[in-house]
Amino acid sequence: MGRKMIADTADTFTYPRIGRIERRSPALDALIAPDAKVEQLAEGFIWAEGPVWIDEGPYLYFSDVPANKMYRWSETRDLSLYLSPSGYEGSDPLAFREPGTNGLIRGPGHSILMADQGNRAIAHFDLDTRTKRFLATRYEGRRFNSPNDLVRASNGTIYFTDPPYGLEGLNDSPLKELPFNGVYRLDPDGSVTLLESGLSFPNGILLSPDERTLFVANSDPRRAIIMAYALDPAGNIVGRRRFVDLTPLVGPDRPGVPDGMAIDRTGNLFATGPGGIWVFTPDGLSLGLIATGSEIANCTFGDADGATLYIASHTMIARVRTRTRGLGV
């Protein structure tokens, strides 16, 4: 586990190049250069997830969810174990299929907001003191399943998904208290509102640049879709549509289902799915595919210019330079 580099000369190193970029439209050239390469940065994880870029450092933080660990990577300081356990600290670990943190995003100040699967909570984590505070653990008195991913609006509202992936037995877990797998809104005052209960396995979640559309990926091979929900100013759903249906692409030759997503400043969606990361225009036109050679869980934009797409792909962390800029980076 750790830095994956190849010596070019006695004094220089490069990261190994992996995978490929498939171009389905010439328009992809405006977002990813024709000669762009996918680089493998680190390897040896069970299931890498939830990457988030933090300028202070700078560092890339990410989860290894089944291992219950959080790692930190930087170009100059390599890879280090940052937090263990990252999630569940109780006495019954066999009750959890994936006890660690999952989705991570930038929080207010020098903090991270976590989808803490093992603790079945949305949490705030202070990067200076390494202290965790739970923001939400229940809906109408019942414990969440295992929050998976989250996104924060400019007014502090948090939207998150709650599939059962953290629980041993998934929907059949005796710990599951809710009869559905929901999409929620957590308001700054701490109130929790159920927005959607009709998706089988809601997973990755994002807001459009104008915050009027909420994108949610459904990680079900039988219904591998990304939904787009129209929001009113209060954050309530007032319309819904299927943004894209990737179900016909699911198969052994293209591992993966819709999972994590990233979005650029003009609304182009970089969405994981069968075969890798699919690049879509704001109206759902497919421009191409970024593939690492293995299933991809999530991605995020980072670096000082916000132009590098960092990728959590099964046992590895990778990256590719783009010609666009991530939203909020």
Image: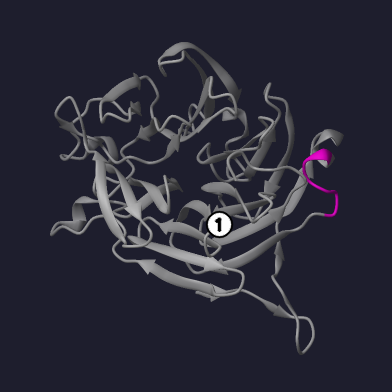
Main secondary-structure element of the magenta-colored stretch: loop
Residue lying at 42% horizontally and 57% vertically, measured from the top left: 63
Residue flagged by tag 1: what amino acid is it? Asp
- Taking the image as shown, residue 257 lies to the left or right of residue 16, namely left
| SS assignment at label 1 | loop
Magenta span contains residue 32: yes
Pick out the residue farthest to the front.
109
Residue 303 vertical position relative to residue 282 in the rendered view, above or below: below
Q: Is residue 268 visible?
A: yes
Residue lying at 21% horizontally and 40% vertically, measured from the top left: 173
- Nearer to me, 169 or 183: 183
Residue 1 vertical position relative to residue 226 in the rendered view, above or below: below
Magenta span contains residue 85: no
Residue lying at 51% horizontally and 41% vertically, measured from the top left: 260
Q: Is residue 169 visible?
A: no
Q: Position of residue 230 (x, y in %)?
A: 51, 15
**Quarter holding residue 201:** top left
Q: Position of residue 300 (x, y in %)?
A: 57, 47
Task: Please state the extent of the stretch shown in magenta in the rendering.
Answer: 30-35
Residue lying at 61% horizontally and 74% vertically, measured from the top left: 4
Pick out the residue farthest to the top.
238
- Nearer to me, 160 or 100: 160
**Which residue position holds label 1?**
55
